[in-house]
Image (spheres, rainbow, N blue to C red):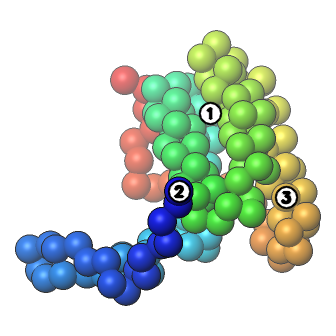
């Protein structure tokens, strides 16, 4: 038999700084805007890492991007099915191209990911959100392969 949920305001966790309610902890969790900002920076870096043939960094960025999207699926369950498909299909194709060190396949899969992102934003009435790849690599990474 299921028990009635306990209101989050009554459940507390203790930290070295004091007690927080579950509701307070939930309020600190990232929303979609923060998650998509992180994803866009990782997706940007992913492109230029692969272009520089730094396949290790590209692999890392695709895995970290997947983690961001999996967090997004938890934060916004209404998107979970589409996010899972995006991770499986888009990042699956990108990861396969990275594993085979195939730049043309990578670039095709990457750009398909941008188009798919646009399609999903349209689906959820967010057509004003469009990722555009900057024409330069991020300046905070040394993209040279090791």
- Residue at image position (61%, 70%) is 32
How packed mark 2 is, by other alpha carbons closer than 10 Å (few <14, some 14-19, many 20 or more), is few
Question: In which quadrant of the rendered view does residue 35 lie?
Answer: bottom right
Q: Pointer 2: what residue?
A: 1
Q: Say if residue 40 shows up in the picture.
A: no
Q: Pointer 1: what residue?
A: 51
- Residue at image position (72%, 34%) is 88
Q: Pointer 3: what residue?
A: 120
Q: Is residue 146 left or right of residue 56?
A: left
**Camera-side mark, 2 or 3:** 2
Distance (Cα) linking label 2 and label 3:
39 Å
Observer-nearest of 49 and 81: 81
How packed mark 1 is, by other alpha carbons closer than 10 Å (few <14, some 14-19, many 20 or more), is some
| Quadrant (top left/top right/bottom left/bottom right) for the C terminus | top left
Horizontal and vertical percent position of residue 115: 86, 50
Question: In which quadrant of the rendered view does residue 85 lie?
Answer: top right
Observer-nearest of 109 and 29: 29
Pick whichever of labels 2 and 3 is earlier in the sequence: 2
Pick whichever of labels 1 and 2 is earlier in the sequence: 2
Please give the label number shown on residue 132: none
**Camera-side mark, 1 or 2:** 2
The answer to whether the residue labelled 3 contacts the one labelled 1, judged by CB atoms less than 8 Å apart, is no
Distance (Cα) linking label 3 and label 1:
26 Å
How packed mark 3 is, by other alpha carbons closer than 10 Å (few <14, some 14-19, many 20 or more), is some
Observer-nearest of 29 and 46: 29
Horizontal and vertical percent position of residue 63: 52, 37
The answer to whether the residue labelled 2 contacts the one labelled 3, judged by CB atoms less than 8 Å apart, is no
């Amino acid at each position: 038999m299921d028990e009635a949920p306990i209101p989050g305001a009554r459940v507390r966790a203790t930290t070295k700084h004091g007690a927080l309610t579950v509701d307070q902890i939930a309020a600190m969790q990232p929303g979609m805007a923060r998650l998509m900002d992180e994803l866009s920076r990782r997706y940007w870096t992913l492109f230029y890492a692969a272009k520089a043939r730094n396949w290790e960094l590209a692999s890392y960025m695709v895995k970290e991007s997947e983690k961001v999207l999996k967090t997004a699926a938890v934060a916004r369950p209404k998107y979970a099915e589409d996010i899972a498909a995006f991770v499986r299909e888009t990042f699956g194709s990108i990861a396969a191209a990275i594993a085979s060190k195939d730049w043309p396949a990578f670039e095709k899969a990457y750009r398909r990911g941008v188009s798919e992102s646009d399609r999903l934003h349209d689906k959820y009435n967010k057509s004003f959100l469009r990722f555009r790849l900057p024409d330069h690599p991020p300046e905070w990474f040394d993209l040279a392969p090791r």
